[in-house]
Amino acid sequence: MSQISVAHNVEGIAGLCVITQTVHGDKRGYFTETYNRRDMAEAGLDYEFVQDNQSSSTKGVLRGLHFQIHYPQTKLVRVICGAVYDVAVDVRRGSATFGKYYGIILTEDNYKQLLIPKGFAHGFLVVSDFAEFCYKCDDYWHPNDEGGIIYSDPEINIAWPKVDAPLNIIERDSKLPLLREAILP
């Protein structure tokens, strides 16, 4: 029996999926499978993930919006501590939803994951005091292949939540181009 439920093509964006894990809890705590390839394949999500990444950040940290240009990655993202507002932007040329974004709060308590297919820019804002963010990728990171778009692009118009902390974004990310000026995958 599958331990996940999947919402396919969220907000009408082809390939973007929200996955909710089944949690088994009792007075001792809980148990959940964070990834089961068979369950994913049965849900039509047959990816071979090759790399796991984890980051920690404090409230107000905004990472992104990033993508790989020549070696695009499918990512399966989740939060294991705290909460983030996670965003995926469709940057697939010719897509009916090009430039459209989807945002979701991922927390340690809601057990949701976002599957972000190749051809999306990705970023997140930490909305809790601290957050640990984990993600699987179906291709390796290539350091000279990074692309991105500015988090504040007015044409995308992401409704980032307000946090009671200063926005903390590295200089490189604050100087990313607008979508219409970016080199896309």
Image (tube, rainbow, N blue to C red):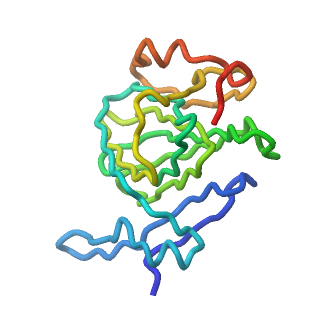
In percent of width and height, residue 7 lies at 62, 65
- Observer-nearest residue: 51 or 166? 51
Residue at image location 48% in from the left, 50% down from the top: 75
- Observer-nearest residue: 138 or 160? 138
In percent of width and height, residue 85 lies at 49, 39
- Observer-nearest residue: 118 or 114? 118
Figure check: 93 above or below 28: above
For residue 182, which quarter of the picture?
Answer: top right
Furthest residue in direction left, as rendered: 28
The C terminus: image quadrant: top right
78 sits left or right of 26 in the view: right
Residue at image location 35% in from the left, 44% down from the top: 133
The N terminus: image quadrant: bottom left
78 sits left or right of 161 in the view: left
Residue at image location 71% in from the left, 29% down from the top: 156
For residue 176, which quarter of the picture?
Answer: top right
- Observer-nearest residue: 14 or 104? 14
* Total numbered circles: 0
In percent of width and height, residue 129 lies at 31, 33
119 sits left or right of 74 in the view: right
Figure check: 39 above or below 159: below
Figure check: 63 above or below 53: above
Figure check: 87 above or below 74: above
Residue at image location 50% in from the left, 35% down from the top: 123
In percent of width and height, residue 91 lies at 68, 37
